[in-house]
Image: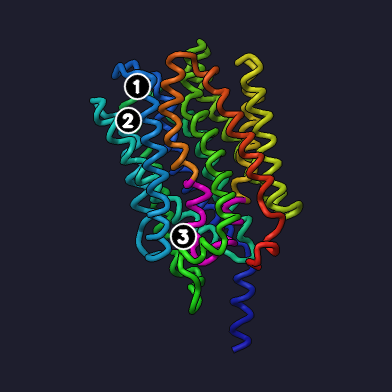
Amino acid sequence: MNSGAEPQNSSAMATPWGAMSILFFVHFVVDSHGTFFSPLIPLLREKFHFTLATAGLLISAQSMTSALSQPLAAMMVDRWPGLPWLAVGIVGSSVAFTAIGWSPVFWGVALAIPVGGLLFGLCHPDMAARAGRLSKAHSSLSVSIFVTGGRMGFAFGPIIAIAIVNYLGMEWLWIYILVSLTATTLVIWHLPNPSNLGERKKEGSPNLWTALRRAQLPISLLFGVAIVRALIMGNLGGFLPTLFVDYGMGLWSGGFANTVLFVSGALGVMAGGIGGDRVGKRTIILIGMVIGLFGMIAFLVFPLKYSFISLAIVGLGNFIPMGVSVALAQELLPEHRGFASSLTLGGGWIVSSFSSAPIAAAAEHIGLLTTFWILPVFLALGVAIALMLPRDLEKLGLS
């Protein structure tokens, strides 16, 4: 019996680079086509003649459906981990999000966006649960690499969409479905199924409601941080291309602004994951919120031609807490990893989804840059929430 245990322990300690790489790529693909709509808003408005307020409603619809579907999807993934949630979500969301390019009528675009959001939300709890369960010895690394893939997807999604539309035409956006099919093939053939990763609920383990009540203080505060992050990234990512086009800087500049925002965010995720193990998760979350606040103020104060520097600071600050928050939430709810990740990855978007429409409506009257002054207020609130986070788990009686 002992001789059989040693290889198992050795295997458990090995870093699962192959599976982590697949999750990185899959998260990249899912999140990249989730960003196709915002950089194409100027072209879609020209084609279908809808207002900026309508664009805000569509951004809210995408945020709301992707956010609301994640907690529900998480409970299904935790309950039935062996079903192909991820494969269905990848292909379905890809078909829906690329439809904004090849749909000949506006109602097709308006329908595709919330449908894509629902299927987009279906993917994330499954991916996050797989990442958290890949290796107990390397869970923080697995989660950070998984999250970084998504940030890189958000970063390059706008450029991918603009490149396809610019060189081939908007109706050719469907070719990205082929990339999604490749990702789905890797999931089905080469990625361990969540039900086979060796983690089972122990006898007498708490149900979801009991676990949430036990960890209600830190979970509530992490949810608050997630809301702030979503408010900033959802509205910046959604309206930056429109802002740059309105100021005469062109669609490519607007797409590149989103790329800068999310590439720096990917660096922030990795920096936060490394720093969280060294200086503490609470400290890293606080540092990230402070950096994001200063970057957002700089973006609004200095001329738009210098905004790429400030956007890099905003992205870095807002994403430093991300991987750390996911890992911490999964530590607090170890029997419900899918739901824990849905709170920190998608939960904030439930609240944030209600902000895009009023921000767009206000921007119709006073301009986007002036309206964006609400965003530093949200970040200041994020700093306050981070300060309220308990300094260690021992004080919570959870360890």
Quadrant assignment, res 113: top left
Q: Is residue 162 visible?
A: no
**Cα distance in 3D space between marks 2 and 3:** 30 Å
What's the magenta region?
325-347
Q: Residue at x 59, y 49 (%)?
A: 221
Which quadrant is the N terminus positioned in?
bottom right
- Magenta: main secondary structure: helix
The first of marks 2 and 3 along the sequence is 2
Q: Residues within 10 Å of mark 1 (few under 14, many from 20)?
A: some
Disc 1/disc 2 C-alpha distance (Å): 8 Å
Mark 3 neighbour density, 10 Å: few (under 14) some (14–19) many (20 or more): some
Disc on the earlier residue, 1 or 2: 1
Residue 122 in picture, x, y percent from top left: 38, 50
Pointer 1 and pointer 2: residues touching (CB < 8 Å)? yes
Q: Would you place residue 25 above or below residue 393 in this image?
A: above
Q: How was the colour assigned to the protein in this rendering?
A: rainbow
Q: Amino acid at mark 1?
A: Leu
Instruction: Say whether disc 3 or disc 1 marks the residue closer to the N-terminus.
Output: 1
Work out whether 194 lies above or below 384.
below
394 or 246, which lies in front? 394
Check disc 2 and report the residue beneath it: 100
Residue 42 visible within the image: yes
**Could you say which disc has been placed on residue 44 in the image?**
1
- Read off the residue under disc 3: 191
Regarding mark 2 in the picture, which secondary structure is present there?
Answer: helix
Q: Residue at x 23, y 25 (%)?
A: 105
Image position, residue 81 (x, y; %): 40, 64
Q: Quadrant of the C terminus?
A: bottom right
